[in-house]
């Protein structure tokens, strides 16, 4: 697994400036040892990018007490605009909770609830990591559509860690706790940030070949169906999750296939996991 060099022209220095250095926020010797051990495990791993990302986030979740997580591609992530996310990996969710999380991510209120975080990332042009209490005003967030869907998904505290990949796409990691759990501390956010920001090559590879450039052209409903298809859901499961008829889901499914020029669910999954094949020669089976 090739580790690419850091790209020039983009300041990727870690940005944790809003986090204070109060004594309780400082990392202990055991914290540092755990960070070094996990970094070492990831760096020497010979697994593919998907497995390495999962190993890293599972390890971070154990260190900071996160209940579940997602690693998504932000196909459109500009402050004040409706963000568009492509969910490519997650852990700790059952189907119902993950479906409700997708509803939160697709809600129009995401345009203003994410504006501060995206604004800081674009202003610094750097990897940023923030806790829930640093991103949104709690009173207004609870009343938002996003807050409602997260509550339905039994999600309370969260940490978001964003790294710009290029002028448009963003590597987006979210770590969650149950609704009634204690907030993440600044120490825990710092642990997550150090581990995620010290491995830039994990953010730069393992995405669709076009980094989801055409996904924002889909309607919000089709983007939601796309994310459920990428999660491996069947037509019947999507219908139950969205409270739609299977016939309606089939129409949406065909529209998604047409958009990406594929004819089956399996081909769609391969397209987003391996690209469109233009970067490699076809095998005998594929050509035949």
Image: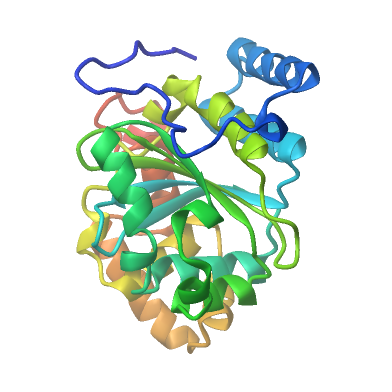
Query: Where does the image place residue 122, in percent across and percent down from the top left?
Result: 26, 41
For the residue pair 50 and 147, the one nearer the viewer reads as 147
Image position, residue 49 (x, y; %)? 52, 27
Q: Position of residue 188 (x, y in %)?
A: 66, 38
Q: Is residue 205 visible to us here?
A: no
| Residue 168 can be seen in this image | yes
**Left or right: residue 283 compared with residue 217:** right
Residue displayed at 60% across by 38% down = 189
In the image, is residue 172 above or below residue 13? below
Q: Residue at x 36, y 44 (%)?
A: 271
> Percent position (x, y) of residue 185?
66, 44
Residue 11's place in the image compared with 266, above or below, is: above
Q: Residue furthest right?
A: 30
Quarter of the image with the C terminus in it: top left
Q: Is residue 106 left or right of residue 124?
A: right
Residue at coordinates 64% horizontally, 33% vertically from top-left? 22
Where is residue 109, by image quadrant? bottom left
Identify the residue at the far front of this view.
22
Viewer-proximal residue among 230 and 265:
230
The residue drawn where x is 37% and y is 13% is 4
Number of numbered markers: 0
Colour convention: rainbow
Q: Is residue 80 above or below residue 118?
A: below
Give the image quarter of residue 234.
bottom right
């Amino acid at each position: 697994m090739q580790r690419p060099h850091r790209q020039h022209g983009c300041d990727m220095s870690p940005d944790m400036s809003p986090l204070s250095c109060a004594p309780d926020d400082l990392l202990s010797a055991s914290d540092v040892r755990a960070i070094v051990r996990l970094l070492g495990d990831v760096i020497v791993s010979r697994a593919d990018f998907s497995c390495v990302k999962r190993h890293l986030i599972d390890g971070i979740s154990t260190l900071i007490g996160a209940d579940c997580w997602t690693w998504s591609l932000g196909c459109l992530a500009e402050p004040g605009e409706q963000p568009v996310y492509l969910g490519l990996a997650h852990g700790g969710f059952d189907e119902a909770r993950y479906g409700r999380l997708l509803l939160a991510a697709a809600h129009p209120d995401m345009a203003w609830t994410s504006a501060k975080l995206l604004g800081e990332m674009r202003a610094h042009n750097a990897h940023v990591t923030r806790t829930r209490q640093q991103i949104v005003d709690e009173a207004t967030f609870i009343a938002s559509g996003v807050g409602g869907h997260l509550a339905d998904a039994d999600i309370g505290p969260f940490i978001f860690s964003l790294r710009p990949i290029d002028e448009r796409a963003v590597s987006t990691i979210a770590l969650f706790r149950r609704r009634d759990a204690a907030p993440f501390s600044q120490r825990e956010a710092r642990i997550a940030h150090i581990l995620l920001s010290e491995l830039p090559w994990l953010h730069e590879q393992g995405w669709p070949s076009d980094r989801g450039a055409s996904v924002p052209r889909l309607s919000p409903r089709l983007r939601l169906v796309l994310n459920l298809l990428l999660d491996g859901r069947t037509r019947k499961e999507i219908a139950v999750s969205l409270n739609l008829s299977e016939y309606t889901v089939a129409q949406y499914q065909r529209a998604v296939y047409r958009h990406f020029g594929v004819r089956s669910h399996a081909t769609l999954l391969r397209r987003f996991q391996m690209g469109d094949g233009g970067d490699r020669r076809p095998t005998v089976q594929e050509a035949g």
